[in-house]
Image (cartoon, rainbow, N blue to C red):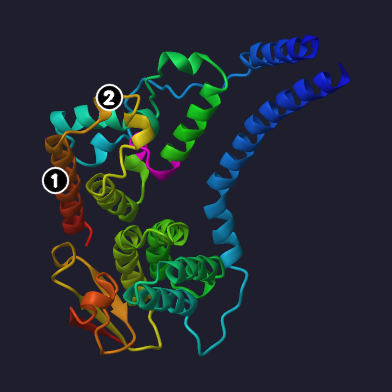
Amino acid sequence: MKSIMAISASILALAFTACNSNSSKQTNNADSTQTQAVAATVTVATNNTNPADGILTGYLDLKNSLAADNGNDAAKNGQEILDALSKFDASALTPEQKKVFLSLVGDIKENSEHIHENGDKIEHQREHFEMLSKDITDLVKSVGTNKTLYLDSCPMYDKGNGTWLSESKKIKNPYLGIKMDTCGVIKETIKN
Amino acid sequence: MNRIKKILLVLLIAFIAIQFVRPVRNTNGQVLPTGISKAVSVPGNVHAILQTACYDCHSNNTTYPWYNYVQPVAWILANHIKNGKKELNFSEFGSYPKRKQQSKLKAIADQVKDGDMPLYSYTLIHKNARLTKKENSVIINWAQNEKDSLDKINP
């Protein structure tokens, strides 16, 4: 009889914890963007770096992983961007730059999360990479960068809407991967 | 034998007990000012498809099946709906930042194109949510066109 009691108690306990964990998780989600914004203002920028450097590094790593058809590395790079985003120093920005950053931060986060969570679905990662590329391009154009960057596009992917940023002049296509890695043209050169 | 009976009895009691722990229903009934139709144009045929195939998990109004009255099914459904709304909520689409609206429209087109949405586990039971080829292309074209027009306003 004792063991029966224990079983029923544990079933009920399980049931209640299932409900509780759901509700607490929900509040976490709602708050996460806010807490991140607060945390971002704490770090201090040094002179020779740009606030978007970390995000940009993660993004360029991601681009190279996708060009190499490596979804697992791409997933790790997604996390790299998320980490950099949480350390992003928004205090160094002008009000205008801050506005741009705030309009992009949610989308960057969401696209990076999807890329991080879909290491086994590289085509899905690429769909989000396309949106992320647009976000990062706008961020870099607003906030600036010490690097010289090339905005590339490939007419063979999503009707030419698939653009990406590259640190080198050499085309390495992150959308089509190894089988078509030289497809693309430089549309724009971005430098400070 | 007696022992098995006792266990079954306890399980039955537990089953009855959990029937009283119900999640809040996801029904609002109103068209909110943040609904998608306030942000982009949603023609009637598109709206009809969205309503039958998407809104159960991606809006503030779920049409519940009868078995939602049985626990623990309602918890499982509530969890699905919570996750679905986190990814995309048509009832709150209008309050998304512009960039997110554009991304979500693209994601809608991509997910339908890839056959990832509506979820197989959902269409298994909701036969009317299985999209025909034509319905698929209606959604894909609509999402792409609306994204393109948002791109023009907000490059």
Q: Residue at x 88, y 20 (%)?
A: A2
Q: Earlier in the sequence, mark 2 or mark 1?
A: 2
Query: Residue A58 occupies which quadrant of the picture?
Result: bottom left
Please provide the residue range marked out in magenta: B86-92
Name the element at disc 2.
Answer: helix
Quarter of the image with the C terminus of chain A in it: bottom left
Is residue A162 or residue B95 the one in the foreground?
A: A162
Is residue A90 or residue B79 the one in the foreground?
A: B79
* Left or right relative to B14: residue A93: left
Query: Residue B123 occupies which quadrant of the picture?
Result: top left
* Left or right relative to A189: residue B86: right
Rendering coords of residue A71 (x, y %): 40, 67
Q: Output the chain of dot 1.
A: B
Question: In the displayed image of the protein, which residue is found farthest to the right?
Answer: A2
Task: Give me the disc on residue B141.
Answer: 1
Height in image: A52 above or below B5?
below
Magenta span contains residue B115: no
Quarter of the image with the N terminus of chain A in it: top right
Q: Which residue is mark 2?
A: B127
Three-letter residue code for mark 2: Lys
Q: Residue at x 60, y 77 (%)?
A: A44
Q: Residue at x 24, y 84 (%)?
A: A171
Name the element at disc 1.
Answer: helix
Question: In the displayed image of the protein, which residue is found farthest to the front?
Answer: B1
* Left or right relative to B1: residue A165: left
Three-letter residue code for mark 1: Asn
Q: Main secondary structure of the magenta part?
A: loop
Rendering coords of residue A24 (x, y %): 63, 39
Q: Nearer the viewer, mark 2 or mark 1?
A: 2
